[in-house]
Each structure stands twice: as structure tokens, then as C-alpha cells.
Image (tube, rainbow, N blue to C red):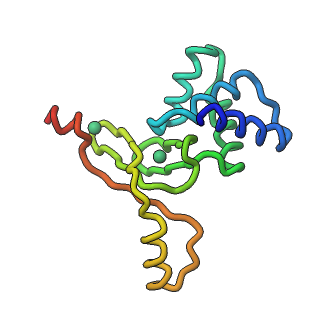
């Protein structure tokens, strides 16, 4: 599945006329399989293991293109670096640890239920949504 995702992303990159450098291909590969919701700096660290000369700007540029294509979900934060999900580029619930900043997917489908209720209540036409749940992850709880 992840291999198909990588192939689809590469195809979309080319359709848009973007050059697929080895660094970008590696980044797309990392993003499309990572369950850890890496930050740009985190991706930069990982990519440098394969391509030591990759700049942080290249990481940001690639993320910007993926965002424009709707192929990466960006989680914006005011107190910490933004994090990215290229495995599931659509809105989905996240569990965020307030101590170690780990972010994992909460595999429940809240979207449709909540969206229907909210739309009914407020009369809004919903274009996007975000479900963040904050707390301590099991590892941080056991270290408390
Ligand atoms: Zn934690
Ligand atoms: Zn996610």
C-alpha cells in the first residue's frame, strides 16, 4: 500500500511539472510511510542520513508542493514546530502527548458524525476540520 502511495505521489509531482530529484523522492518515501508525524526539522535529520547535503529549504519546498497537491496534512502549532502526515493527507483525529510531543493517529472515524451535527447546529458549510486530543502517552505515564 505504501509503495502504491509513493508511486502515486511521484506521478502527481511530475504532472505538475516539478523535477523529482533523488532528495525529493527520498522525502516523499519517508513522508508516505511515517506514522510519527515528523516536523520539517525531523525530516531534515532523517533525509541527511541518505543525502547529507540536503538543505532544510529543500525539505520546506517539497512540503509546500505536497501541501499544494493536497498530499500532505499539515498540523500547525503555535508553541512547537508544525508536523506533517503524508500517509493520511486528509483530516483525522490525533492524540498529542503534552510531554514528549509524540503524535499518533486515533483510529476512530469521528469526522462524519461530528460534521453532520455541527453543520445542523450552526448552518456552516464545513471546508476543513481538526480533532486534537491532548494528554500523556503511555510511555510518559509510566515515567511519571
Ligand atoms: Zn509522551
Ligand atoms: Zn495523522
Please state the horizontal and vertical placement of residue 130, each as a whole percent of the image. Answer: 46, 60
Give whichever of 90, 59 is nearer the camera: 90
In this rendered view, identify the residue nearer to me: 89 or 97. Answer: 89
Residue in the image at 64% along x and 15% along y: 51
Residue 49 sits in quarter: top right
Q: Work out whether residue 33 or residue 22 is closer to the camera in this orientation and state it.
A: 33
> How many circles with numbers are drawn on the protein?
0
Q: In the rendered view, tell whether residue 103 sits above or below residue 132.
A: above
Report the residue that reaches farthest toward the front. Answer: 1
Q: Quadrant of ligand 1?
A: top left
Name the residue: 56% across, 65% down: 128
Which image quarter holds the N terminus?
top right
- Would you say 126 lies left or right of 113 here? right
Q: Residue at x 66, y 36 (%)?
A: 4
Q: Position of residue 110 (x, y in %)?
A: 42, 63
x, y (%) of residue 45?
52, 22
- The percent position of residue 38, horizontal first and vertical second, equals 49, 35
Q: Residue 16 sits in which quadrant?
A: top right
Q: Which quarter of the image is occupied by the C terminus?
A: top left
- Who's the residue at 48% across and 68% down the image? 112
Vertical order, 95 against 56 (above or below): below
Left or right: 4 in relation to 113: right
Amino acid at each position: 500500500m505504501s509503495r502504491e502511495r509513493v508511486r502515486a505521489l511521484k506521478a502527481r509531482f511530475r504532472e505538475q511539472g516539478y523535477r523529482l530529484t533523488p532528495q525529493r523522492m527520498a522525502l516523499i518515501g519517508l513522508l508516505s510511510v511515517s506514522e510519527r508525524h515528523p516536523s520539517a526539522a525531523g525530516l531534515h535529520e532523517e533525509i541527511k542520513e541518505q543525502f547529507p547535503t540536503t538543505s532544510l529549504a529543500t525539505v520546506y519546498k517539497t512540503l509546500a508542493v505536497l501541501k499544494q497537491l493536497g498530499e500532505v496534512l499539515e498540523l500547525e502549532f503555535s508553541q512547537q514546530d508544525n508536523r506533517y502526515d503524508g500517509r493520511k493527507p486528509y483530516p483525522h483525529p490525533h492524540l498529542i502527548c503534552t510531554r514528549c510531543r509524540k503524535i499518533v493517529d486515533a483510529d476512530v472515524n469521528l469526522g462524519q458524525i461530528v460534521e453532520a451535527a455541527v453543520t445542523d447546529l450552526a448552518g456552516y458549510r464545513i471546508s476543513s476540520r481538526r480533532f486534537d486530543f491532548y494528554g500523556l502517552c503511555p510511555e510518559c505515564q509510566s515515567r511519571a
